[in-house]
Image (cartoon, rainbow, N blue to C red):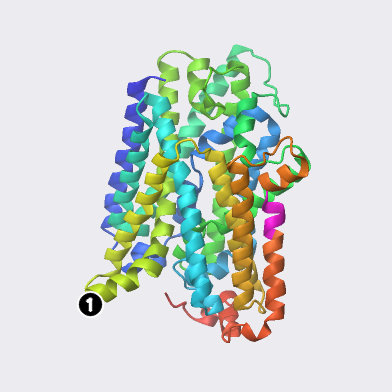
Amino acid sequence: MNGPAGIVAISVVCLLTLVIGAFGLRLSRTTSDFYVAGRSVSPGWNASAIGGEYLSAASFLGVAGLVYSLGVDMLWFPVGYTVGYLVLLVLVAAPLRRSGAYTLPDFAEARLESKQVRSLASVLVVGIGWLYLLPQFQGAGLALSTVTGAPPGLGSLIVAVVVLANVVAGGMRSITLVQAVQYWIKLTAISVPAFVLLAIWVRSGHPAPGVAPGAGGAAWGDALSGYGGRDHPVYSTYSTILALCFGTMGLPHVLVRFYTNPDGRAARRTTLVVIALLGLFYVFTPVYGVLGRVYLPTLPAAVRPDSVTLLLPQAMTPGLLGTLLSAVLAGGAFAAFLSTASGLTISVAGVIDQDLLDPRLHRMSGGDVSRIQTFRLAAVVAVILPYAASWLTPNVSLADTVGLAFAVAASTFCPLLILGVWWRRLSVPGAAAGLLTGGVLALGATTITVLGGVSSTGHGWLGALLAQPAAWTMPTAFLVAIVVSLATPSRIPAGTSRTMVRLHAPEAVSGPATTA
């Protein structure tokens, strides 16, 4: 790729992000603005913002790399990402909004009336958020290095600075505007080059590309070993679908978006629009992997298949047109890093502020420190630690880290949310036991795989179960939460009936939700 063109594209995306964020600052004046955008975001804008933060560079670049290397079977990944919002729509979207919470720990405390469960949920939110932020910083460095030849650390630094500037300046109100615009930037960046490249392919007379499973290089499959028990493909496929569908429900930066809707009905409408927007985006990403099999049958040494999207334009049309198309794609990929990192920072900062910084700072300052000031300090903490970790762990696989986040989210918050919303008999010990069991099992299984103790190939069922744990860790967490709750009926929160009415009754019946 031509370095100057890529630099210009990435610079435009970063500057546009800062300008939109500055405009959002003018609209952010209250604590509610910083946490949940004043709970007044329309379904259309909110859906665009969700699409902006959810479609990370793993979606922008990774899906094409998967199809290029491993074939049509890898389309389960975008299917799982999208279906996760259907699960949200059916099970928890409207009740979450009606809960009146700012964060997942707020919901846990409101439903279970327990500070202990809230603290446990807070630790998990921060852990999952940092796990997901780590590959965003690492990926930004990798992308900028691939596009321009710059040191990888520079890309990480750019993302950290731009995200922190927007979050500290305007909170959720600012980030909502940024992410909504960035969705349409990403859709344009992925679709326009796809149409051009398809037109070139049609005119060239090349035969239809093959998409048989497993027809690509082996290196990318090895890099994805943290996701799949490839010795047992049926189990691996179903476990992948479970992790993506129910892990999406448990991602804190996804759930916090539903607190920004005016009411439960708007939350459901938002989810419907999100499904349409994600489906539209994922129509284009496999095109690059399929065409890559024709025009890039082999990749240079040390070049990973997830770069096929950026390399394909120049392979198909060398010269100015190819350079411009690659630059457009590079800008879209960088927008993906920025928007996803922004959403994660908001969710982690909200929890750090409410559960760690806010009470202590107010006690030390005699009440002189405002909630907005503590939120800004929390945002700095939320960004600095994973940014530093991206320097300390440069060789950690991006796929392994993202897989860990999905597995932990599916095995912890998914049981808490589904049982908390739909089962009156959930007790405090049951909820805590489910969170601990799911977190320990998923974290342990994926850590063993990441550290290389057991791989997903050559180890039979043990490797399959550890490399793709969601199919057994999530049901185990559900089972433990249910059994412990049935054994401790005296620990069911006293206000359960009142809370369940609030979660399920229309706002006109139950009244406006109180904020945390």
- Residue 290 drawn at (x, y percent): 63, 25
> How many residues crowd mark 1 within 10 Å: few (<14), some (14–19), many (20+)?
few
Tell which residue pokes out farthest to the front in this image: 453
User: Residue at horizontal 40%, vertical 28%?
Assistant: 145
User: Residue at horizontal 59%, vertical 53%?
Assistant: 443
The answer to whether residue 403 is magenta is: no
User: Residue at horizontal 39%, vertical 40%?
Assistant: 391
Q: Quadrant of the N terminus?
A: top left
Residue type at the position of mark 1: Gly
Q: Main secondary structure of the magenta part?
A: helix
Write down the quadrant of residue 462 in the picture: top right
- Residue 390 drawn at (x, y percent): 42, 42
Count of marks overlaid on the render: 1
User: Residue at horizontal 58%, vertical 55%?
Assistant: 408
Location of residue 127 with respect to 422 vertically, above or below: above
Location of residue 185 with respect to 477 vertically, above or below: above
The answer to whether residue 473 is magenta is: yes
Which residues are drawn in magenta? Answer: 468-474
Who is closer to the viewer here, 446 or 63? 446
Residue bearing mark 1: 366
Location of residue 514 with respect to 403 vertically, above or below: below
Who is closer to the viewer here, 327 or 128? 128
Who is closer to the viewer here, 26 or 244? 244
Secondary structure at badge 1 equals: loop
Write down the quadrant of residue 282 in the picture: top right
Q: Quadrant of the C terminus?
A: bottom left
User: Is residue 137 toward the left or the right of residue 304 in the image?
Assistant: left
- Residue 373 drawn at (x, y percent): 27, 64
Q: Is residue 481 visible?
A: yes
